[in-house]
Amino acid sequence: NAGVTQTPKFRVLKTGQSMTLLCAQDMNHEYMYWYRQDPGMGLRLIHYSVGEGTTAKGEVPDGYNVSRLKKQNFLLGLESAAPSQTSVYFCASSYSTSRSYNEQFFGPGTRLTVL
Amino acid sequence: AQTVTQSQPEMSVQEAETVTLSCTYDTSESDYYLFWYKQPPSRQMILVIRQEAYKQQNATENRFSVNFQKAAKSFSLKISDSQLGDAAMYFCAYSGGWGATNKLIFGTGTLLAVQP
């Protein structure tokens, strides 16, 4: 049971390049999330998904796209990277809510630098 | 919109002593959850403790406990018998209640140093 994994762990891009970050979970979770972490700002939600084939915007969605074609995978895409997207990106997953909150499990993070 | 505020960017504690990290939040919801996450230098996000707003009893997990003051919208974390391994960034986080898709709203964090 690997939990939540993220690929790659580190990446350096030039301005204007594109890339995709992959998040995979093996816990059969319905919900998945992408956050970014910047110094002094905590983690902020970019996009999230409540099930296969569905996605929704979070707090800071501009410049990113996501897809959830398979339940276990959640992809975050940057079509044209900008220096402002230099950050650490975290993926998380959880069971769907019923009457009680279900813990979010986080991946190890991806450090992205855009030059 | 909900907000979470951590007013202590850095804190320091002596090993074996007790430290309290502060967190305040703002919400108009009556049903919600509050969390403390630990982030060591490895970057891994680790859930330390959680509190359901409908529960009056403060949550406790071993050396970690919270002081939840719902009316004051305050949620502090107390670490007793501090250990060197407690040194980390600590984030307070909020999530809406039932049906809110578990989205987390984080504070800006408190960096805790533990002095030997």
Image: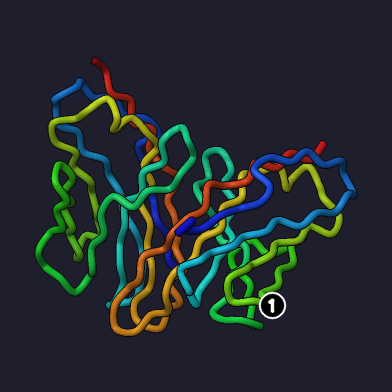
Residue at point 38% right, 80% down?
A97
The quarter holding residue B94 reads: bottom left
Tell me the chain of label 1.
Answer: A
Number of labels in the image equals 1
Q: How is the image coloured?
A: rainbow
Q: Residue furthest front?
A: A1
Q: Quadrant of the N terminus of chain A?
A: bottom left
SS at mark 1 in the image? loop
Q: Quadrant of the C terminus of chain A?
A: top right
Residue at point 64% right, 76% down?
A70
Q: Is residue B39 above or below residue A45?
A: above
Q: Residues within 10 Å of mark 1 (few under 14, many from 20)?
A: few
- Residue A58 is situated, as x and y percent measured from the top left of the image, at 59, 68
Q: Is residue A70 above or below residue A84?
A: below
The quarter holding residue B85 reads: top left
State the residue in front, A21 or B103: A21
State the residue in front, B26 or B12: B12
Q: Residue furthest left?
A: B57
Q: Which residue is mark 1?
A: A69
- Residue A34 is situated, as x and y percent measured from the top left of the image, at 59, 61
State the residue in front, A69 or A38: A69
Residue at point 42% right, 79% down?
A96
Q: Residue flagged by tag 1: what amino acid is it?
A: Leu
- Residue A108 is situated, as x and y percent measured from the top left of the image, at 53, 47
Q: Residue furthest top?
A: B116
Residue at point 63% right, 46% down?
A110
Q: Is residue A32 left or right of residue B41?
A: right
